[in-house]
Image (spheres, coloured by chain):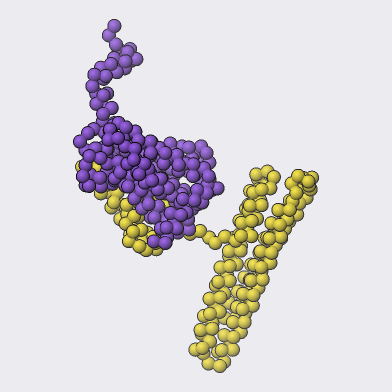
C-alpha cells in the first residue's frame, strides 16, 4: 500500500510539474514529450529550467581556446577569461541592440504609410537616425571581431619555445589590446546613451 | 522519424557524445531508445512463460534501468556540487541519458547473442544475462572514454558509475523475479541455499566472531 501511495504522489508531482513547465513554455510541444515529462520529471526539470544556450561567436571561442593554451599562472588566466567573457557579453549586447534597431526601422516604415506629408518628414528623420545608429553598431561589431581575430592570430603565433623570454612582453601587449577593446565598448555605450538621451529630450 | 534516426547516429558515433541543442526533445528520444532496448533484452531473457510473461519481464528490465537512472539523479547533483563541476546539471543529465540510450542499444544487440547461447539452465542463463549487461556497461564506458568532451573528472565519474551500478543492483532486486515463472531466480536459489543447512554453519561463525559461542 505504501508503494502505491508513493507512486501516486510521484505521478501527481510529475503531472503538476509538467503542467507548470508547459505553462511557462519551457516544455516542447508533443504528446510523447509531455507524457515522458510526467513519468521522468526528475530528469526533465533541470533540463527545462536551464537557460537556453546563447549563440557563440567563433572568434571569441578561438580567443578562449588561446587563453587556455597560454603558459601563465591560473590567476592571470582567470583575469583573461573574465575579460574575454566581458567582451562576449558586450558583443551580445551590441547584437541585441542591432536587432532592436532593425525592428524599430520596420515599425517606422510601417508607420510612414499611415501619415500625412508633414509627419512623414519627421518619421524620415528618425529613420535616418536609426539607420545611422545601425551602421555604427555594425561597424563597431566588425571592428571588434577584427581585433579579436588579430589577437587570436597573435596568440597562435607566439612561439612558446623560441621566444619564451618575450612571452611576458607579448602577454603585456595582449592585455593592452584586450583593454583597448573593452574601453572601445565603454566609449560606444556612453556615446549611445548620449544619443538616446538626446532623442528622448527631442521627443 | 528523421530526428530519431539522426539521434541514433549521434549516439553511435563514440567521439560525439555532447550535450544536444534541443535538450528536452533529445532526452525523450534517449529515454525511449533506452526503454525499448532494455525491453527487447528483457523479452529475450524471459523463458518458460507465455507472451504476457515476456511483456512483463520486458517492462521489468526497462523499469530496472530507468528507475536506477532516476534514483541516480539526486546523488549525482550532490556529486556535482561537492566536486564543483563546471558543467551545468542539465548538461550532465542530458549526457547521462545519452549513455543510458547507448547502453540500451548495446543490450538490445546482446539479446540475439543470449538467444543463441542460452541452454535453458537457470544458473547458466542468469550468468549469461548478467554477463551481457556487464558487457554493455563496459561498452558504454569505453565509448565515453573516447569522447572528446569530459563532463566529469575521473574521481566523480568513477563515483557516479559506482553509484549507478549500486542503484541498478538495488532496482534489480526490487523488480525481481524475471527469469522463469516456474523456477526460482538465481538469487532466490542462492537465498534458499543460505536459508537451508548452511545457515547453521554461518550462525556458528557469526557467534564465534561475536564471542558468544558456547565452548
Chain B appears what colour? purple
Compared to residue B174, the image places residue A153 above or below, namely below
Q: Which chain is yellow?
A: A
Whole-percent x, y for residue B102 in the image: 42, 48
For the point 34% across and 50% down, the residue is: B36
Looking at the rendered image, the quarter that the C terminus of chain A falls into is bottom right
Q: Judge by depth and name the residue closer to the eye, B94 or B56.
A: B56
Which quadrant holds residue B178? Answer: top left
Question: Does residue A24 appear in this view?
Answer: no
Compared to residue A17, the image places residue B205 above or below, namely above
Question: Does residue A108 appear in this view?
Answer: yes
Whole-percent x, y for residue A99 in the image: 55, 71
Q: Judge by depth and name the residue closer to the eye, B12 or A135.
A: B12
User: Is A112 displayed left or right of B206 in the figure?
Assistant: right
For the point 59% across and 89% down, the residue is: A121
Whole-percent x, y for residue A200 in the image: 58, 77
Which quadrant holds residue B71? Answer: top left
Q: Judge by depth and name the residue closer to the eye, B130 or B125.
A: B125
Amino acid at each position: 500500500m505504501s508503494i502505491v501511495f508513493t507512486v501516486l504522489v510521484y505521478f501527481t508531482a510529475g503531472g503538476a510539474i509538467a503542467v507548470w513547465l508547459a505553462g511557462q513554455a519551457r516544455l516542447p510541444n508533443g504528446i510523447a514529450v509531455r507524457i515522458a515529462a510526467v513519468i521522468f520529471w526528475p530528469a526533465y526539470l533541470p533540463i527545462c529550467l536551464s537557460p537556453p544556450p546563447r549563440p557563440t561567436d567563433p572568434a571569441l571561442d578561438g580567443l578562449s581556446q588561446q587563453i587556455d593554451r597560454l603558459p601563465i599562472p591560473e590567476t592571470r588566466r582567470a583575469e583573461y577569461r573574465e575579460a574575454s567573457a566581458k567582451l562576449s557579453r558586450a558583443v551580445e549586447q551590441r547584437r541585441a541592440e542591432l536587432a532592436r534597431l532593425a525592428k524599430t526601422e520596420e515599425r517606422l516604415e510601417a508607420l510612414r504609410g499611415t501619415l500625412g506629408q508633414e509627419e512623414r518628414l519627421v518619421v524620415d528623420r528618425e529613420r535616418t537616425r536609426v539607420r545611422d545608429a545601425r551602421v555604427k553598431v555594425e561597424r563597431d561589431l566588425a571592428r571588434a571581431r577584427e581585433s579579436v581575430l588579430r589577437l587570436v592570430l597573435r596568440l597562435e603565433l607566439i612561439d612558446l619555445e623560441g621566444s619564451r623570454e618575450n612571452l611576458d612582453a607579448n602577454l603585456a601587449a595582449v592585455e593592452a589590446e584586450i583593454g583597448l577593446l573593452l574601453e572601445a565598448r565603454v566609449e560606444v555605450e556612453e556615446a549611445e546613451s548620449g544619443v538616446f538621451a538626446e532623442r528622448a529630450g527631442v521627443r | 522519424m528523421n530526428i530519431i534516426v539522426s539521434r541514433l547516429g549521434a549516439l553511435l558515433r563514440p567521439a560525439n557524445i555532447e550535450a544536444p541543442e534541443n535538450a528536452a526533445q533529445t532526452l525523450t528520444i534517449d529515454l525511449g531508445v533506452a526503454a525499448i532496448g532494455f525491453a527487447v533484452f528483457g523479452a529475450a531473457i524471459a523463458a518458460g512463460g507465455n507472451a504476457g510473461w515476456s511483456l512483463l519481464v520486458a517492462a521489468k528490465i526497462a523499469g530496472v534501468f530507468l528507475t536506477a537512472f532516476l534514483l541516480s539523479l539526486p546523488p549525482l547533483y550532490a556529486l556535482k556540487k561537492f566536486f564543483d563541476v563546471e558543467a551545468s546539471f542539465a548538461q550532465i543529465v542530458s549526457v547521462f541519458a545519452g549513455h543510458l540510450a547507448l547502453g540500451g542499444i548495446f543490450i538490445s544487440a546482446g539479446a540475439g547473442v543470449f538467444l543463441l547461447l542460452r541452454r535453458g539452465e537457470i544458473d547458466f542463463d542468469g550468468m549469461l544475462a548478467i554477463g551481457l549487461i556487464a558487457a554493455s556497461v563496459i561498452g558504454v564506458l569505453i565509448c565515453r572514454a573516447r569522447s572528446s568532451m569530459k563532463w566529469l573528472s575521473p574521481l566523480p565519474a568513477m563515483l557516479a558509475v559506482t553509484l549507478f551500478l549500486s542503484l541498478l543492483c538495488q532496482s534489480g532486486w526490487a523488480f525481481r523475479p524475471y527469469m522463469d515463472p516456474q523456477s526460482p531466480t538465481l538469487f532466490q536459489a542462492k537465498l534458499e541455499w543460505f536459508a537451508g543447512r548452511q545457515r547453521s554453519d554461518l550462525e556458528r561463525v557469526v557467534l564465534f566472531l561475536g564471542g558468544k559461542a558456547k565452548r
